Image (cartoon, rainbow, N blue to C red):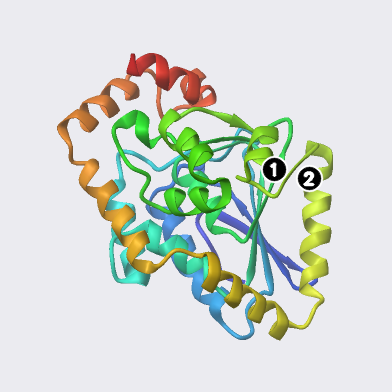
């Protein structure tokens, strides 16, 4: 079994269970991206796992967002696999892997954390604990890792623009109704449901699974050029003086610490922006 810095993994019945455990709050940084870079080639191998379930060891956070202090560093780690400093292209590569990928979400999934979940083939969330948000607009940024592409296809124009422009938090029931996730389930039922589904899929012949994934991706997954454009816009936006000023102001309120700001980011982001 490969050793990872931020993933706790075990295999069962053809399913790889990968629990994200990157204290203090599962931010996307160089270590987590390095583990994804290490994992993806294994999912592309003929003898790799048929199904992967991503969950979180942190009850409050699935992946809250990127580490805003390490944008250049984690983008360079992504480049070691996809050839360009883009986690959007890295997440698209995950979408194209041979394995069926399932996000089991309990806690906050915002920004690139939401985009990582969207890159997975399916998403199931805790009705009581899951929160979703695309927070980039509140910083003066455009989402750079797939949210624009995925949410527009999943939700339609109006709801996608609501989610992307409001930078607000959405509970699991609303996320289900909008198409952000497959289903919202009670917390007590989430893990058993996902495990049963993953093991059921893993029992089926892999040729059919891979053919279906390939055809669905051909119909629905945005092009590499579209992902690259979004990634470039995010990278350019991060250098904008107004964006840097806003990041600095929000950081002073307690961003990237386990406190009220991160737990209630959607509400507080709007208040600080005002």
Which residue is identified by label 2?
Answer: 190
Who is closer to the viewer here, 43 or 274? 274
Marks 1 and 2: in contact by CB < 8 Å?
A: yes
Q: Compared to 121, does 60 lie above or below?
A: above
**Which mark is on residue 47?**
none
Q: Is residue 223 left or right of residue 104?
A: left
Q: Position of residue 58 (x, y in %)?
A: 62, 39
Quarter of the rendering occupied by the N terminus: bottom right
Label 2 crowd (10 A; few <14 / some 14-19 / many >=20): some
Q: Quadrant of residue 130?
A: top right
- Which quadrant: the C terminus? top left
Give the image location of residue 163, x and y in percent.
Answer: 49, 35
Q: Looking at the image, how many numbered discs can be counted on the residues?
A: 2
From the viewer's perspective, tell me whether residue 200 is left or right of residue 153.
Answer: right
Q: Is residue 51 above or below residue 123?
A: below
Which residue is found at the position 30% from the left and 45% from the top? 70
Residue 39 visible, this orientation: no
Label of residue 125 in the image? 1
Whether residue 30 is visible: yes
Residue located 64% across and 81% down the image: 211
**x%, y% of residue 254?**
40, 21
Q: Residue at x 33, y 22 (%)?
A: 250
Q: Which residue sits at x=59%, y=76%?
A: 215
> Where does the image place residue 65, in percent across and percent down from the top left?
45, 40
Mark 2 → mark 1, Cα distance in angstroms? 7 Å
The residue lying toward the viewer, choosing from 167 and 247, is: 167
Of labels 2 and 1, earlier in sequence is 1
Mark 1: give few (<14), some (14-19) or many (20+) Cα within 10 Å: many
In this rendering, the answer to whether 194 lies above or below 2 is: above
User: Which is nearer the eye, 152 or 32?
Assistant: 152
């Amino acid at each position: 079994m490969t050793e990872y810095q931020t993933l706790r993994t075990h295999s069962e019945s053809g399913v790889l269970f990968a629990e994200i455990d990157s204290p203090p709050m599962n931010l996307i940084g160089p270590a987590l991206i390095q583990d994804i870079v290490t994992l993806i080639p294994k999912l592309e191998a003929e003898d790799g796992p048929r199904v992967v379930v991503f969950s979180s060891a942190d009850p409050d956070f699935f992946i809250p967002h990127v580490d805003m202090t390490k944008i250049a560093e984690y983008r360079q780690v992504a480049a070691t696999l996809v050839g360009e400093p883009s986690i959007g292209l890295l997440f698209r590569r995950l979408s194209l892997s041979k394995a069926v990928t399932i996000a089991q979400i309990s806690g906050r999934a915002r920004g690139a954390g939401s985009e990582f979940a969207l890159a997975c083939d399916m998403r199931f969330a805790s009705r009581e604990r899951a929160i979703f948000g695309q927070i980039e607009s509140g910083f003066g940024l455009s989402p750079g890792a797939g949210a624009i592409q995925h949410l527009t296809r999943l939700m339609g124009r109006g709801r996608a623009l609501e989610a992307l422009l409001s930078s607000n938090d959405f509970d699991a029931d609303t996320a289900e109704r909008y198409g952000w996730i497959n289903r919202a389930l009670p917390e007590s039922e989430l893990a058993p449901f996902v495990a049963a589904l993953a093991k059921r899929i893993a029992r089926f012949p892999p040729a059919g699974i891979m053919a279906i994934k390939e055809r669905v991706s051909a119909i629905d997954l945005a092009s590499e050029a579209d992902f690259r454009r979004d990634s470039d816009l995010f990278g350019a936006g991060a250098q904008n003086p107004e964006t840097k000023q806003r990041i600095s102001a929000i950081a002073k309120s307690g961003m990237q610490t386990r406190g009220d700001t991160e737990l209630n980011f959607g509400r507080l982001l709007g208040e600080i922006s005002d």
